[in-house]
Image (spheres, rainbow, N blue to C red):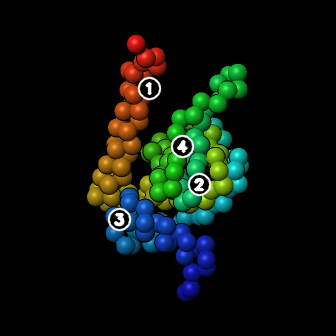
Amino acid sequence: MELDLNQKKIQESLQNAVIISRLPLDMQERVRKHARLHTLKEGETLFSQGDEVHAFYLTLSGSIKLYRLSPEGQEKIIEISSPGQLFAEALMFMDHPHFPVHASALTNAEVIAIDASDFASMLRTSVDACFLLMADMSQRLHHLIKEIDDLSLNSGCLLY
């Protein structure tokens, strides 16, 4: 069976994604079969805070802004996802998860939505795949903690 253009793009992109490319070939194929391509225009919403989680995402092009809104309506940016980055993958481990943030395209963007429940089911069959994903999430957590340290421990004013 020949793949359509979107499926070819998904397959090629997943093969280049570090965490997915390190999975066994049968798992890569399963991820591809359950993945969907989304094209977003600048400012378009991918999901809103409180929406039920059905997928996690791989940014292919452009930038995706993950943010929360303060009670006054001010945006608080949590993270900006660039090409090659996964986001919202940790939510698949929660019972009945809902997105804790909003996501919208900072620029025109393409993302791949990866079916979260199928991916979690697949992980139940492979300890190695679990460790790959945990290593990736741990590395991102370490990066975010460093970023928090840099923002909170470094003074914003210069002493002369």
Residue 65 location, x and y as percent? Answer: 59, 43
Residue matched to label 3: 23
Q: Looking at numbered disc 4 in the image, what kind of residue is underneath it?
A: Ile
Residue 114 location, x and y as percent? Answer: 53, 59
Alpha-carbon neighbours of circle 1 within 10 Å: few (<14), some, or many (≥20)? few
- Residue found at x 68% / y 22%: 71
Between marks 3 and 2 in the image, the one whose residue lies nearer the viewer: 2
The answer to whether the residue labelled 1 contacts the one labelled 3, judged by CB atoms less than 8 Å apart, is no
Residue matched to label 2: 62
Disc nearer the start of the sequence (3/2): 3
Q: CA distance from mark 3 to mark 2?
A: 25 Å
Between marks 3 and 4 in the image, the one whose residue lies nearer the viewer: 4
Residue matched to label 1: 151
The answer to whether the residue labelled 3 contacts the one labelled 2, judged by CB atoms less than 8 Å apart, is no
Disc nearer the start of the sequence (1/3): 3
Q: Looking at numbered disc 1 in the image, what kind of residue is underneath it?
A: Leu
Task: Give the secondary structure at mark 1.
Answer: helix
- Residue found at x 43% / y 66%: 16
Say whether residue 156 is left or right of residue 135: right
Residue matched to label 4: 80
Q: CA distance from mark 1 to mark 3?
A: 35 Å
- Whether residue 135 is visible, yes or no, is yes
